[in-house]
Amino acid sequence: MILFATRDGTGRPMIGRGSGVRVDRQSGHLHFLASGSQWPDAVGEALAGRPIAMTYVRAADYKACQIKGRILAAGPADEAHRARGEAYVAEQLARMLALGVTRMQLSSTLSDQELVCLTIEPQAIFEQTPGPGAGRRLIPEAAA
């Protein structure tokens, strides 16, 4: 599962669920996908130069990490990104159904419709798995 948070110009948080991500191994940037129709407020505030936080959770055991970064660019997903988003949503539906979550429960959280691709520069990674290590920085902040 992927959750993300942006904020509006007044600092009010906007949240949504991601629809896939790809790491560019050369640049280290993330190409993060989210549904503009499912999460219009969060996606609408995902503007170049603004911060973003993304939490990645393994549903089977809630092992999680959070990546904080800066949005470099935002725009409609191209064909390759749309295919990645569709595959991600199908995979997550299968995983969650196997854990006993119903398709109806998932219908309001997972979408591959109107995908937007955010290019993100990661700046810090934190452990978010519940327990004594939650919040611990895993990767030092990037040098400015």
Image (cartoon, rainbow, N blue to C red):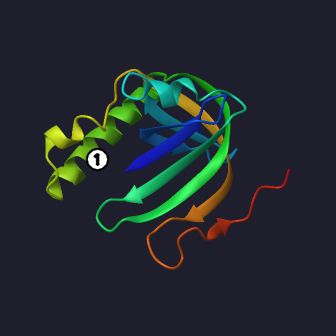
Q: Is residue 92 left or right of residue 48?
A: left
What x and y, as percent, mark residue 122? 66, 49
Give 121 or 22, whichever is nearer the viewer.
121
Count of labels in the image: 1
Q: Residues within 10 Å of mark 1 (few under 14, many from 20)?
A: some
Seen in the picture, residue 80 relative to 103 is either above or below; the reply is: above
Residue at position x 19%, y 42% from top?
A: 105
Residue 7's spot in the image, x, y percent?
59, 35
Residue found farthest to the right: 144
Q: Amino acid at mark 1?
A: Gln
Q: In the current view of this chain or complex, which residue is farthest to the bottom?
A: 132
Residue occupying the point 67% across, 57% down:
124
**The quarter of the displayed image where residue 20 is located:** top left
Q: Where 58 falls versus 54 (above or below)?
A: below
Q: Position of residue 51 (x, y in %)?
A: 67, 40
Q: Secondary structure at mark 1?
A: helix
Residue position for label 1: 92
Q: Position of residue 98 (x, y in %)?
A: 16, 56
Residue drawn at 57 percent across, 32 percent down: 118
Q: Quadrant of residue 34?
A: top left
Q: Is residue 72 above or below residue 40?
A: below
Residue at 70%, 44% (x, y): give it: 27
